[in-house]
Image: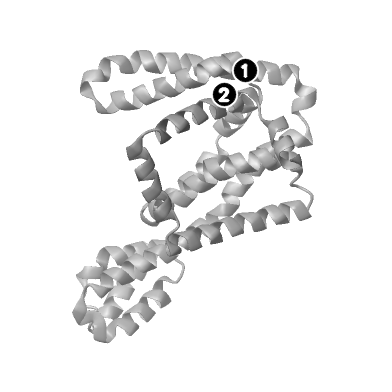
Amino acid sequence: METIRIIFLEINNREKAIIFWSSIFFIWTLSKKDVRKSLFHLLKAFFAPKLFIVFVLFSSYILILLNIYNKIGFWEPFLLKDTIIWFFGVGLVLFANIPEAEKDENFFKELLIKNLKVFVLIQFVVNTYVFNLPFELIVVPVTAILGAMGVLAEYKDEHKIIRKPITIVLSTIGFTYIIFSFSVAFSDSSNFLTSTTLKKFILPLSLTVLLIPLIYFLAVIFLYETVFMRLSFKKYFEPNMKSIKFAVIKTCSLNLARLRRFEKIVWDYDLSKNEELIKAMEQVKIDNKA
């Protein structure tokens, strides 16, 4: 009960509005038979042994980080809400994007840049100082609907005409939030410029950055699995498969860039022959240096 009380006290009006409308939308979707069926299949896939084990590893890593934060005195109970929001809003998104990390060479660079932009501070202030509940209850669904309409307009040529007005309205709402939030923050600087606020700002950013090594490691493991599965399709590789796997692991190790390169050239060489295998590994090294 104490945990629920702490979370409830930390929830602001915008978050209450989001919870309210999300609950209504969730209940409405569950009333649809097709949605319930899809949700069942999704949950079934999630609890598949391989995916679930990786998720447990992922969650355990985050719990270890939080335990370290707690031991050094950084994490406190008032950060529980922010931790939960980060986990479901950022943590799980990164978990779902591990396959993207396998393929995209700029994934980790862009992730770091995104978290170091000034926009992150602006977003934090906007989410800290919000309007009263009635206003948020109106604006939250309006913004969500307009955002969805804007996305649809991007893919439908016949809806191009509404793109500009939607953009103008959303920009106006955004600037209104920014002006209001920063004006309140400046007037309330004695409460804003505190260690509590600093911790709320640093927590999600630091967790995201510290999660990168695990995401990288899992991306490497998953890509190895993909590469080795592709190699198994070539039946005439089988007699030399142990040597091939050993050479790939020795050459690529935890170097994701090299492993990506090997995946691209895997069919350019007859790896059943040792001389071809050596050439392939040298090519991976050369291209990685280049």
Pick the front one: 208 or 275: 208
Instruction: Please tell me whether residue 174 is drawn above or below residue 242 in the rendered image.
Output: above
Work out which residue is located at the far bottom of the displayed protein and give it. 239
User: Which residue: 38% across, 41% down?
Assistant: 36
**Amino acid under label 1?**
Leu
Q: Give the x, y percent position of residue 175.
A: 53, 17
Q: Could you tell me if residue 289 is visible in this image?
A: no
**Amino acid under label 2?**
Ala
Location of mark 1 (residue)? 133
- Quadrant (top left, top right, bottom left, bottom right) of the N terminus: top right
What number is the disc on residue 104?
Answer: none
Q: Secondary structure at mark 2?
A: helix
Q: In the figure, residue 170 lies in which quadrant? A: top left
Instruction: Please tell me whether residue 55 is drawn above or below residue 133 in the rendered image.
Output: below
> Mark 2 touching mark 1, by CB under 8 A?
yes
Q: Is residue 132 left or right of residue 2?
A: left
Pick the front one: 215 or 147: 147
User: Which residue: 76% across, 44% down?
Assistant: 76
Q: Give the x, y percent position of residue 290.
A: 36, 61
What number is the disc on residue 17?
Answer: 2
User: Which residue: 32% across, 63% down?
Assistant: 261
Instruction: Please tell me whether residue 200 is drawn above or below residue 234 in the rendered image.
Output: above
Q: Secondary structure at mark 1?
A: helix
Pick the front one: 209 or 200: 200
Cα distance between the residues tagged 2 and 1: 7 Å
Colour setting: one colour
Q: Is residue 136 left or right of residue 98?
A: right
Between disc 2 and disc 1, whose residue precedes?
Answer: 2
Q: Is residue 86 left or right of residue 93?
A: right
Q: Give the x, y percent position of residue 224.
A: 38, 68
